[in-house]
Image (tube, rainbow, N blue to C red):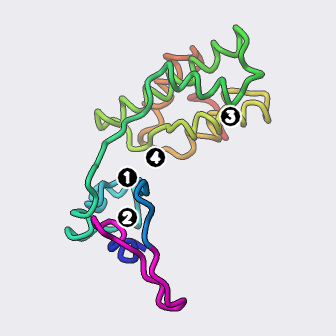
């Protein structure tokens, strides 16, 4: 796929469709955006299995590269409340706030090398959805995130959970 769009990424780029005998010229306001977890350099960490290193000629055609981190706590809170409007109550806001604090702790633990699995906003969404399904936040957490973690890292994750919710998940099985 990347080779096909290589010509489009050039200053006077265009796309040639040989099977249709057509040349497509982009509109002057055409822009192309892409995302990559590895910035095109491959994955030495093993976190993104299957990620390939891009060749330098391909990387050179991308004029702007930006690194984005996770959104800040308040913005993530806004995202969750927009998706789960029915939770926009004092109790719902408090629970989502703590869930995001839990996610923030996993992100900090990941950056410090304490754990290798991180909670994304997508994981928080799954956790909220599973909490709604099972009517049990603790079980939903185990099913949505804890069970994905390496056995050796689960004590650290359980400690994060204890800090946020005051609940010890050590004895729980799922």
Residue identifier under label 4: 150
Instruction: From the top left corner, tell me how far across and down residue 152 is, in percent.
Output: 42, 42
Q: Eyeballing the image, is 70 above or below 22?
A: above
Residue 19 horizontal side relative to residue 137, left or right: left
- Name the mark on residue 105: none
**SS under mark 1:** loop
**SS under mark 3:** helix
Which of the two residues, 156 or 106, is positioned nearer the viewer here? 106
Of labels 1 and 4, earlier in sequence is 1
**SS under mark 2:** loop
- Name the mark on residue 140: 3
Residue 125 horizontal side relative to residue 155, left or right: right
Quadrant location of the C terminus in the rendered image? top right
Judge depth for marks 3 and 2 and give the one in front. 2
> Can residue 12 be found in the magenta stretch?
yes
- Mark 1 surroundings within 10 Å by alpha-carbon count, few (fewer than 14), some (14 through 19), many (20 or more): few
Residue identifier under label 2: 51
């Amino acid at each position: 796929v990347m080779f096909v769009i290589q010509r489009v990424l050039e200053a006077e780029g265009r796309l040639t469709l040989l099977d249709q005998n057509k040349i497509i010229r982009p509109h002057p306001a055409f822009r192309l955006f892409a995302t990559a977890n590895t910035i095109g350099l491959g994955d030495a960490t093993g976190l993104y299995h299957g990620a390939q290193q891009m060749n330098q000629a391909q990387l050179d055609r991308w004029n702007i590269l930006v690194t984005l981190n996770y959104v800040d706590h308040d913005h993530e809170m806004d995202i969750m409340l927009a998706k789960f409007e029915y939770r926009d109550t004092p109790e719902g806001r408090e629970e989502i706030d703590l869930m995001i604090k839990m996610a923030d702790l996993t992100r900090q633990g990941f950056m410090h090398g304490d754990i290798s699995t991180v909670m994304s906003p997508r994981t928080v969404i799954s956790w909220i959805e599973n909490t709604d399904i099972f009517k049990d936040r603790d079980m939903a957490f185990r099913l949505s995130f804890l069970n994905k973690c390496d056995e050796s890292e689960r004590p650290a994750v359980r400690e994060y959970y204890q800090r946020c919710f005051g609940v010890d998940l050590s004895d729980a099985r799922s």
